[in-house]
Amino acid sequence: MEMKPNSSDLPPFFYMEALGLLPSQTYFAVVMGTVAYCFILAGNMTMILSITLNRSLHKPMYLMLLNLPVNDLMGATAFFPQLISSIALEDRSISCAACFLQGLLVHLYGGGAYIILTAMAYDRFLAICYPLRYSTLMSNANLLKIIVVMWLLDLVLISVLFCLIARFRFCGNSIADMYCNNPSLVKLVCGDTSINNYYGLFLSSFLQGMSLLAVVFTYVQILVACLTNKQSDTKSKALRTCATHLVIFLVFQVTAIFKVVSHKLNQSPYLKRAMGVSMLLFPPMFNPLIYGLNTKEIRSVVIHFITKKKATSFDR
Protein backbone atom coordinates (compact mmCIF):
# COMPACT_ATOMS: atom_id res chain seq x y z
CA MET A 1 0.00 0.00 0.00
CA GLU A 2 1.47 3.33 -1.05
CA MET A 3 1.84 5.89 1.71
CA LYS A 4 0.92 9.49 0.99
CA PRO A 5 3.08 12.01 2.81
CA ASN A 6 1.58 14.90 4.74
CA SER A 7 2.90 17.46 7.17
CA SER A 8 2.54 15.09 10.12
CA ASP A 9 4.61 12.35 8.46
CA LEU A 10 7.87 14.18 9.13
CA PRO A 11 9.13 14.93 12.65
CA PRO A 12 9.96 18.60 13.30
CA PHE A 13 13.48 17.63 14.39
CA PHE A 14 15.91 14.77 14.03
CA TYR A 15 18.49 14.03 16.70
CA MET A 16 21.91 12.72 15.73
CA GLU A 17 23.86 10.42 18.01
CA ALA A 18 25.66 12.09 20.90
CA LEU A 19 29.40 12.42 20.49
CA GLY A 20 30.08 11.62 24.12
CA LEU A 21 32.57 14.44 24.54
CA LEU A 22 33.68 15.57 27.96
CA PRO A 23 33.35 19.30 28.73
CA SER A 24 37.13 19.63 28.49
CA GLN A 25 37.08 18.05 25.01
CA THR A 26 34.38 20.27 23.54
CA TYR A 27 36.63 23.29 22.96
CA PHE A 28 39.31 21.13 21.35
CA ALA A 29 36.75 19.47 19.03
CA VAL A 30 35.36 22.85 17.92
CA VAL A 31 38.85 24.22 17.23
CA MET A 32 39.97 21.12 15.32
CA GLY A 33 36.77 21.02 13.28
CA THR A 34 37.09 24.71 12.43
CA VAL A 35 40.76 24.35 11.47
CA ALA A 36 40.00 21.34 9.26
CA TYR A 37 37.12 23.18 7.52
CA CYS A 38 39.21 26.34 7.01
CA PHE A 39 42.06 24.22 5.59
CA ILE A 40 39.62 22.59 3.15
CA LEU A 41 38.18 25.99 2.17
CA ALA A 42 41.62 27.51 1.61
CA GLY A 43 42.97 24.59 -0.42
CA ASN A 44 39.95 24.17 -2.68
CA MET A 45 39.37 27.90 -3.17
CA THR A 46 43.04 28.23 -4.17
CA MET A 47 42.48 25.53 -6.80
CA ILE A 48 39.33 27.22 -8.09
CA LEU A 49 40.87 30.70 -8.26
CA SER A 50 44.11 29.42 -9.80
CA ILE A 51 42.20 27.78 -12.66
CA THR A 52 39.53 30.43 -13.23
CA LEU A 53 41.77 33.52 -13.03
CA ASN A 54 44.69 32.20 -15.09
CA ARG A 55 44.02 31.95 -18.81
CA SER A 56 46.92 29.54 -19.33
CA LEU A 57 44.93 26.94 -17.37
CA HIS A 58 41.76 27.36 -19.46
CA LYS A 59 42.30 23.95 -21.05
CA PRO A 60 39.99 20.90 -21.01
CA MET A 61 42.09 19.05 -18.43
CA TYR A 62 42.00 21.89 -15.90
CA LEU A 63 38.42 22.95 -16.63
CA MET A 64 37.42 19.34 -15.98
CA LEU A 65 39.52 19.36 -12.82
CA LEU A 66 37.74 22.56 -11.69
CA ASN A 67 34.64 20.49 -10.91
CA LEU A 68 36.52 18.48 -8.28
CA PRO A 69 37.21 21.31 -5.76
CA VAL A 70 33.68 22.66 -6.33
CA ASN A 71 32.31 19.22 -5.45
CA ASP A 72 34.65 18.89 -2.46
CA LEU A 73 33.53 22.28 -1.10
CA MET A 74 29.89 21.21 -1.41
CA GLY A 75 30.49 18.04 0.61
CA ALA A 76 32.60 19.70 3.30
CA THR A 77 30.17 22.63 3.67
CA ALA A 78 27.24 20.24 4.04
CA PHE A 79 29.00 18.54 6.94
CA PHE A 80 31.39 20.77 8.92
CA PRO A 81 29.35 23.92 9.78
CA GLN A 82 26.48 21.86 11.16
CA LEU A 83 28.83 19.60 13.13
CA ILE A 84 30.86 22.50 14.57
CA SER A 85 27.76 24.46 15.62
CA SER A 86 26.13 21.40 17.20
CA ILE A 87 29.27 20.69 19.26
CA ALA A 88 29.67 24.34 20.30
CA LEU A 89 26.01 24.68 21.28
CA GLU A 90 25.85 21.13 22.70
CA ASP A 91 22.72 20.56 20.63
CA ARG A 92 22.65 17.57 18.27
CA SER A 93 19.17 18.34 16.91
CA ILE A 94 18.61 19.31 13.29
CA SER A 95 15.39 20.37 11.60
CA CYS A 96 13.78 17.99 9.14
CA ALA A 97 14.38 20.31 6.18
CA ALA A 98 18.02 20.86 7.15
CA CYS A 99 18.52 17.12 7.60
CA PHE A 100 17.16 16.31 4.15
CA LEU A 101 19.23 19.12 2.63
CA GLN A 102 22.39 17.88 4.34
CA GLY A 103 21.74 14.33 3.21
CA LEU A 104 21.05 15.46 -0.35
CA LEU A 105 24.26 17.53 -0.54
CA VAL A 106 26.40 14.79 1.03
CA HIS A 107 25.13 12.22 -1.46
CA LEU A 108 25.50 14.67 -4.35
CA TYR A 109 29.11 15.07 -3.25
CA GLY A 110 29.68 11.31 -3.14
CA GLY A 111 28.01 10.62 -6.48
CA GLY A 112 29.64 13.68 -8.05
CA ALA A 113 33.12 12.52 -7.03
CA TYR A 114 32.65 9.18 -8.82
CA ILE A 115 31.28 10.82 -11.97
CA ILE A 116 33.89 13.60 -12.09
CA LEU A 117 36.81 11.21 -11.58
CA THR A 118 35.39 8.99 -14.33
CA ALA A 119 35.14 11.95 -16.71
CA MET A 120 38.69 13.00 -15.83
CA ALA A 121 39.94 9.49 -16.64
CA TYR A 122 38.17 9.71 -20.02
CA ASP A 123 39.82 13.08 -20.68
CA ARG A 124 43.29 11.63 -19.95
CA PHE A 125 42.49 8.63 -22.17
CA LEU A 126 41.68 10.90 -25.13
CA ALA A 127 44.69 13.15 -24.52
CA ILE A 128 47.21 10.28 -24.39
CA CYS A 129 45.72 7.71 -26.78
CA TYR A 130 44.40 10.16 -29.39
CA PRO A 131 46.67 13.24 -29.12
CA LEU A 132 46.13 14.36 -32.73
CA ARG A 133 42.34 14.30 -32.41
CA TYR A 134 42.21 15.52 -28.79
CA SER A 135 41.44 19.16 -29.58
CA THR A 136 38.50 18.07 -31.75
CA LEU A 137 37.17 15.38 -29.42
CA MET A 138 37.49 17.64 -26.36
CA SER A 139 36.40 20.93 -27.92
CA ASN A 140 34.81 23.64 -25.77
CA ALA A 141 31.34 22.55 -26.90
CA ASN A 142 31.99 18.88 -26.10
CA LEU A 143 33.60 19.77 -22.79
CA LEU A 144 30.56 21.85 -21.80
CA LYS A 145 28.25 18.95 -22.73
CA ILE A 146 30.27 16.53 -20.58
CA ILE A 147 30.21 18.86 -17.57
CA VAL A 148 26.46 19.51 -17.87
CA VAL A 149 25.73 15.78 -18.24
CA MET A 150 27.92 15.01 -15.20
CA TRP A 151 26.02 17.32 -12.88
CA LEU A 152 22.57 16.51 -14.32
CA LEU A 153 23.18 12.77 -13.96
CA ASP A 154 24.33 13.24 -10.38
CA LEU A 155 21.35 15.46 -9.52
CA VAL A 156 18.77 13.11 -11.05
CA LEU A 157 20.19 9.95 -9.45
CA ILE A 158 20.43 11.45 -5.96
CA SER A 159 17.10 13.33 -6.16
CA VAL A 160 15.30 10.07 -6.91
CA LEU A 161 16.98 8.53 -3.86
CA PHE A 162 15.57 11.20 -1.53
CA CYS A 163 12.17 11.38 -3.24
CA LEU A 164 11.78 7.70 -2.40
CA ILE A 165 12.41 8.48 1.29
CA ALA A 166 10.14 11.54 1.45
CA ARG A 167 7.04 9.52 0.52
CA PHE A 168 7.11 7.63 3.85
CA ARG A 169 6.07 8.36 7.41
CA PHE A 170 8.84 8.26 10.01
CA CYS A 171 8.51 6.21 13.20
CA GLY A 172 11.59 7.65 14.87
CA ASN A 173 13.80 10.73 14.87
CA SER A 174 17.17 9.42 16.09
CA ILE A 175 19.86 9.53 13.38
CA ALA A 176 22.44 6.82 14.11
CA ASP A 177 25.27 8.71 12.47
CA MET A 178 27.37 11.90 12.58
CA TYR A 179 25.28 13.48 9.82
CA CYS A 180 22.05 12.88 7.90
CA ASN A 181 22.27 10.35 5.09
CA ASN A 182 20.12 7.87 3.21
CA PRO A 183 20.91 4.68 5.22
CA SER A 184 20.23 6.39 8.56
CA LEU A 185 16.95 7.91 7.33
CA VAL A 186 15.72 4.64 5.81
CA LYS A 187 16.14 2.94 9.21
CA LEU A 188 13.57 5.37 10.67
CA VAL A 189 10.91 4.77 8.01
CA CYS A 190 7.59 3.10 8.83
CA GLY A 191 6.70 0.62 6.14
CA ASP A 192 8.26 -1.51 3.46
CA THR A 193 11.52 0.05 2.22
CA SER A 194 12.34 -2.68 -0.32
CA ILE A 195 12.27 -0.24 -3.25
CA ASN A 196 14.54 2.16 -1.40
CA ASN A 197 16.98 -0.64 -0.59
CA TYR A 198 17.01 -1.94 -4.16
CA TYR A 199 17.52 1.53 -5.61
CA GLY A 200 20.23 2.34 -3.07
CA LEU A 201 22.02 -0.90 -3.96
CA PHE A 202 21.66 -0.15 -7.67
CA LEU A 203 22.95 3.40 -7.20
CA SER A 204 26.01 2.32 -5.22
CA SER A 205 26.79 -0.49 -7.66
CA PHE A 206 26.29 1.74 -10.69
CA LEU A 207 28.43 4.64 -9.46
CA GLN A 208 31.23 2.54 -7.98
CA GLY A 209 31.14 -0.09 -10.71
CA MET A 210 30.97 2.41 -13.57
CA SER A 211 33.80 4.45 -12.09
CA LEU A 212 36.02 1.44 -11.40
CA LEU A 213 35.46 -0.17 -14.81
CA ALA A 214 36.04 3.12 -16.63
CA VAL A 215 39.25 3.86 -14.75
CA VAL A 216 40.60 0.32 -15.24
CA PHE A 217 39.78 0.36 -18.95
CA THR A 218 41.26 3.81 -19.60
CA TYR A 219 44.41 3.11 -17.61
CA VAL A 220 45.04 -0.15 -19.42
CA GLN A 221 44.74 1.74 -22.72
CA ILE A 222 46.98 4.52 -21.42
CA LEU A 223 49.59 2.02 -20.23
CA VAL A 224 49.64 0.35 -23.65
CA ALA A 225 49.97 3.74 -25.37
CA CYS A 226 52.84 4.75 -23.08
CA LEU A 227 54.69 1.46 -23.65
CA THR A 228 54.45 1.86 -27.42
CA ASN A 229 55.40 5.56 -27.34
CA LYS A 230 59.14 6.02 -27.73
CA GLN A 231 59.14 9.70 -26.71
CA SER A 232 60.33 9.61 -23.09
CA ASP A 233 59.24 13.17 -22.29
CA THR A 234 55.70 12.55 -23.48
CA LYS A 235 55.58 9.23 -21.66
CA SER A 236 56.82 10.62 -18.33
CA LYS A 237 54.44 13.59 -18.45
CA ALA A 238 51.49 11.31 -19.23
CA LEU A 239 52.35 8.91 -16.42
CA ARG A 240 52.83 11.78 -13.93
CA THR A 241 49.44 13.27 -14.82
CA CYS A 242 47.71 9.91 -14.58
CA ALA A 243 49.43 9.03 -11.30
CA THR A 244 47.98 12.16 -9.69
CA HIS A 245 44.47 11.27 -10.84
CA LEU A 246 44.91 7.64 -9.77
CA VAL A 247 46.02 8.60 -6.24
CA ILE A 248 42.94 10.82 -5.80
CA PHE A 249 40.69 8.08 -7.18
CA LEU A 250 42.15 5.51 -4.76
CA VAL A 251 41.85 7.89 -1.78
CA PHE A 252 38.16 8.40 -2.50
CA GLN A 253 37.51 4.69 -3.12
CA VAL A 254 39.16 3.70 0.17
CA THR A 255 37.27 6.32 2.20
CA ALA A 256 34.01 5.32 0.50
CA ILE A 257 34.64 1.71 1.56
CA PHE A 258 35.32 2.94 5.11
CA LYS A 259 31.95 4.71 5.04
CA VAL A 260 30.13 1.51 4.02
CA VAL A 261 31.98 -0.58 6.63
CA SER A 262 31.21 1.96 9.37
CA HIS A 263 27.49 1.08 9.14
CA LYS A 264 28.35 -2.55 9.94
CA LEU A 265 30.46 -1.77 13.03
CA ASN A 266 28.89 -2.22 16.43
CA GLN A 267 32.00 -2.26 18.61
CA SER A 268 34.04 0.94 18.93
CA PRO A 269 31.85 4.04 18.48
CA TYR A 270 34.93 6.22 17.96
CA LEU A 271 36.24 3.99 15.16
CA LYS A 272 32.78 3.94 13.60
CA ARG A 273 32.59 7.75 13.63
CA ALA A 274 36.10 8.19 12.27
CA MET A 275 35.45 5.79 9.40
CA GLY A 276 32.04 7.32 8.75
CA VAL A 277 33.34 10.87 8.25
CA SER A 278 36.58 9.95 6.46
CA MET A 279 34.95 10.39 3.04
CA LEU A 280 33.98 13.97 3.92
CA LEU A 281 37.34 14.82 5.48
CA PHE A 282 40.29 13.28 3.65
CA PRO A 283 39.43 13.72 -0.08
CA PRO A 284 38.48 17.43 0.25
CA MET A 285 41.59 18.01 2.37
CA PHE A 286 44.12 16.05 0.30
CA ASN A 287 42.88 16.62 -3.26
CA PRO A 288 44.16 20.23 -3.52
CA LEU A 289 47.50 19.18 -2.02
CA ILE A 290 47.91 16.22 -4.37
CA TYR A 291 47.03 18.17 -7.50
CA GLY A 292 48.75 21.36 -6.40
CA LEU A 293 52.05 19.67 -5.56
CA ASN A 294 52.12 17.22 -8.47
CA THR A 295 50.82 19.42 -11.29
CA LYS A 296 53.55 21.77 -12.48
CA GLU A 297 51.20 24.26 -14.15
CA ILE A 298 48.99 24.72 -11.07
CA ARG A 299 52.00 24.82 -8.74
CA SER A 300 53.68 27.55 -10.79
CA VAL A 301 50.48 29.65 -10.85
CA VAL A 302 50.09 29.41 -7.06
CA ILE A 303 53.77 30.24 -6.45
CA HIS A 304 53.56 33.19 -8.85
CA PHE A 305 50.45 34.50 -7.09
CA ILE A 306 52.05 34.19 -3.63
CA THR A 307 55.30 35.89 -4.66
CA LYS A 308 53.37 38.66 -6.41
CA LYS A 309 51.25 39.16 -3.30
CA LYS A 310 54.37 39.40 -1.11
CA ALA A 311 56.01 41.88 -3.50
CA THR A 312 52.88 44.04 -3.45
CA SER A 313 52.78 44.05 0.35
CA PHE A 314 56.49 45.04 0.54
CA ASP A 315 55.93 47.91 -1.89
CA ARG A 316 53.31 49.32 0.41
Image (cartoon, rainbow, N blue to C red):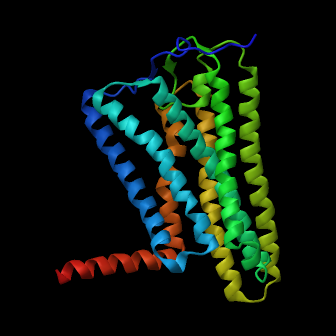
Q: Quadrant of the C terminus?
A: bottom left
On the image, the x and y values in percent for residue 271 come to 50, 34
**Is residue 77 among the parts visible in the rendering?**
yes
On the image, the x and y values in percent for residue 272 come to 52, 32
Q: Which residue is painted at 70% across and 54% down in the image?
A: 149
On the image, the x and y values in percent for residue 303 come to 39, 78
On the image, the x and y values in percent for residue 17 come to 45, 23
Q: Answer left or right for 263 relative to 90.
A: right
Q: Tell me the quarter of the picture where residue 196 sits.
A: top right
Number of dots carrying numbers: 0
Q: Does 28 sit above or below residue 162?
A: below
Q: Which residue is painted at 76% across and 73% down in the image?
A: 137
**Is residue 296 among the parts visible in the rendering?**
no
Q: Does 188 sit above or below residue 300?
A: above
Q: Tell me the quarter of the picture where residue 31 sits.
A: top left
Q: Which residue is painted at 59% across and 59% down in the image?
A: 248
Q: Does 103 sit above or below residue 17?
A: below
Q: Which residue is painted at 32% across and 81% down in the image?
A: 308
Q: State the residue lying farthest toward the left.
A: 316
Q: Quadrant of the N terminus?
A: top right
Q: Answer left or right for 227 relative to 119.
A: right
Q: Answer left or right for 227 relative to 154.
A: right
* Residue closer to the observer: 307 or 1: 1
* Residue closer to the observer: 266 or 256: 256
* Residue closer to the observer: 270 or 85: 85
Q: Does 147 sit above or below residue 96?
A: below
